[in-house]
Image (cartoon, helix red, strand yellow):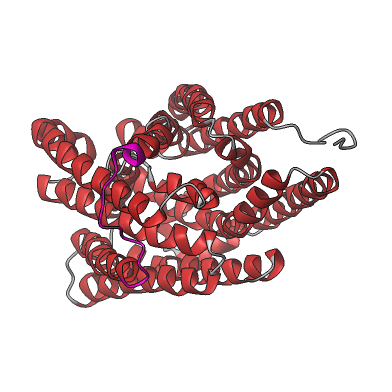
Amino acid sequence: MLSLGKSGLVYLVSNIAVAAVPFALLPVLTHYLSPTEYGVVAMFTTFLPIIGAFVGLSVHGAISRRWFDKENVKIDEYVSSCIFILLCSMVVVLIAIGVMSSWLSEALSLPLHWLVAAVVVSFCGFLIQVRLVIWQVESKPIHYGIFQFGNAFLNAVVSLVLVAILLYGYSGRLWGYLVSALFFGALGIALLKRDRMLGARIRREYIKDALMFGVPLIPHVIGSFLIVIADRLVVKEILGTEQAGIYMLAVQVSLVLNMIFVSLEKAYTPWLYKRLKDNISHQKEGVVRLTYLLFGLISTLVFVMIFLSDILINIIAPPEYSGAAEVLPWLFMAQGFHGMYYLVTNYLFFNRKTYVTASITIFCGGISIFLTIILTYNFGLVGTAVGTAIGLFFQFSLTWLMAAKVHSMPWFRKATE
């Protein structure tokens, strides 16, 4: 088992590698796809997390939490019960899409077959997440990184061949998502079976337990959509698909920071859960000191990336995407707030207060979408990014406040036993 520092370094390297793959694709995609076509790709990637909230109902997170209760839970049967939930939820989602297909196709500028493909990608993505989350709690970041990078690399290779060589346009990029998801979803199941993580029984009590964890997260995922994803729909409806493509380019560049922060969170979460379970005062003080240090590191990275915003856009994209440079500093700031949020939200997950997380995210999502609409009408793409940053700032602040109430930590005082 690797230490926190070594695990964090492995996650960081793997996530930078994963982020580098689509980042390296950007000059190619912006050369072969017009802003309008890139906007269609943005609508597909916007639709994925919405569908993902309902395909599987986020119960893969329950596996991570129950891993630390292995003395009371048969993990293999718990995993099988979660996959049963995945199958049932996928059927329901496909029926719902069939009923709403005309409206969804018009709203997202996507034909029905790509809406169905998004469900398949989300289904496979759940299987991938189950495999990844078990490696995470087992503190096997190398396995995690290789699998994650392989998925991103295959996605990029298929996209590159279909877009740049066969000239399939935006559909070539979407085929990249579908092919890589199918391959690594199947591989994830095979590896779970090999490692005896799939039980022969599906247990009702495990289904109930997983749903009690995952279902309250649906409002959380929807709220997250309102904060960090709905901005693309707002841009499309108010400013058009072409502007949505320009905005999506800025979002894609800002996600470089997000990948760094996610890698930190992957190493940090198992380490944090162990110390919260031990409940020792001097360890709590160490957790708080480290959290403040990471807040400072995140802020520093954000300011550096803001300084580099113009340079990055000029290097990556042709002149028709130049409007992304004005948007990027605000999106880097938004990613900074999101990174800090990762460091405080796990106190609520550890104490199974997912309904609190959901309430905060829905509230902040409402604020964010309201501000984003108003600011987009008045200030264009910059207003959209500002609304997103404000929403994520409120989410971080309120989550930290509630985490302090749910789990006592010496944020501003010395710990006591």
Is residue 313 among what the camera can see? no
Residue 356 lies, with reference to residue 189, above or below; the image says: above
Residue 405 horizontal side relative to residue 195, left or right: right
Q: In which quarter of the image is residue 199?
A: bottom left
Instruction: Identify which residue, 71 or 359, lies in the foreground.
Output: 71
Residue 239 lies, with reference to residue 290, above or below; the image says: above
Figure quadrant of the C terminus: top right
Residue 27 screen position, x and y as percent: 40, 68
Q: In which quarter of the image is residue 414?
A: top right
As for residue 44 lying within the magenta part, the answer is: no
Figure quadrant of the N terminus: bottom right
For the point 21% across and 72% down, the residue is: 162
Residue 113 screen position, x and y as percent: 11, 50
For the point 58% across and 31% down, the residue is: 395
Is residue 258 among what the camera can see? yes
Instruction: Identify which residue, 403 or 332, lies in the foreground.
Output: 403
Residue 166 lies, with reference to residue 83, above or below; the image says: below
Residue 220 screen position, x and y as percent: 45, 32
Residue extent of the magenta highlight = 194-207
For the point 84% across and 45% down, the residue is: 285
